Amino acid sequence: MSKPLVIITGASSGIGAATAKLFSEAGHPLLLLARRLPEMEALALPNALCRAVDVMDVDAFRAAIAEAEARFGKADCLVNNAGVMFCGDPVKQSADEWQRMLDVNLRGLLNGIQLVLEGMVARQSGTIVNIGSIAGVKTFPKHAVYCGTKFAVHAITETIRQEVSGSDVRLVTIAPGMVETDLVNHSTDAEARDGWWEYANRIGGALKPESIAQSILFAYQMPQSVCVREMVVCPTRQEP
């Protein structure tokens, strides 16, 4: 392949699918990972290996990377996009929802980092893009645990970036504000979910996933000697 392999998690919809399309248009072979295989295959992207992998399943994650690298060469970029968000009153929100956010947003992200970082350091090249959030920069009511996971994503990314910078490996945090995806629809708290959409409509709409995909591609396409450490991307009319 003329361009190196890019791995994208959470690639079945939203930011992940939009990023897959954009990197494919830029000529990159892809490893697309998500739990929903038909949605990824429906993208019908050339030179894209699609595998139904939960980022919590580190063995399946590792096997998929090995398969893709055998076909397309070593991974030069990982976009850690898989994540979940459950908005809710902390008095009433279930511990299961808290645990799911901790598992996917943190352990899943760390699994991806661990599986590619050593090889990137050895090759002295590579980029890991972690999808954070405006909720990793400031806090929001009914987002306590989600904010906690995203603050951790920002801290993990920045700390590892410092530790591997001497090996010319880049770690980037892309922190979206309100984005038009089905992420918020997973919330079981109807009041919090409806309030999110009501505010998005009031400010003229949330961002399209394509805007975040463009931000990811911009950071990646900078020279390897340039690291866009963190980018916060929000609708202009979003106040907080």
Image (cartoon, grey):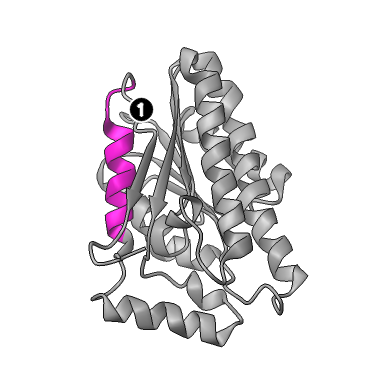
**Which residue occupies 41% across, 64% down?**
14
Q: Quadrant of the N terminus?
A: top left
Residue 35 belongs to the span the image colors magenta: no
Nearer to me, 65 or 196? 196
Q: Quick one: 47 or 161, which is closer to the camera?
A: 161
Compared across the picture, whether 167 is left or right of 216 comes to right
Q: Is residue 207 left or right of residue 174?
A: left
Magenta highlight on residue 223: yes
Residue at position x 63%, y 61% in the image: 145
- In the figure, 196 relative to 97: above or below? below
Reading the image, the residue beneath label 1 is 227
- Residue 105 position, x and y percent, is 60, 53
x and y percent of residue 226 in the render? 31, 23
Quick one: SS at disc 1?
loop
Quarter placement of the C terminus: bottom left
Q: Position of residue 117 (x, y in %)?
A: 57, 27
Amino acid type of the residue that numbered disc 1 sits on in the rendered structure: Cys
Q: Residue at x 51, y 32 (%)?
A: 158
Residue at left offset 34%, top offset 39%:
28
Label 1 neighbour load within 10 Å: few <14, some 14-19, many 20+: some
Query: In the picture shown, does residue 86 fall above or below 64?
Result: below
* Nearest to the observer: residue 151 or residue 107: 151
Residue 122 rendering spot, x and y as whole percentages: 55, 15
Dominant SS of magenta comes to helix
Range shown magenta: 210-224
Q: Is residue 208 above or below residue 150?
A: below
Out of 157 and 58, give the one closest to the viewer. Answer: 157
Question: In this orientation, does residue 147 appear?
Answer: yes
Locate residue 85: give its quadrant: bottom right
- Regarding residue 21, the answer to whether it shows in the image is no
Most distant residue in the right direction: 95
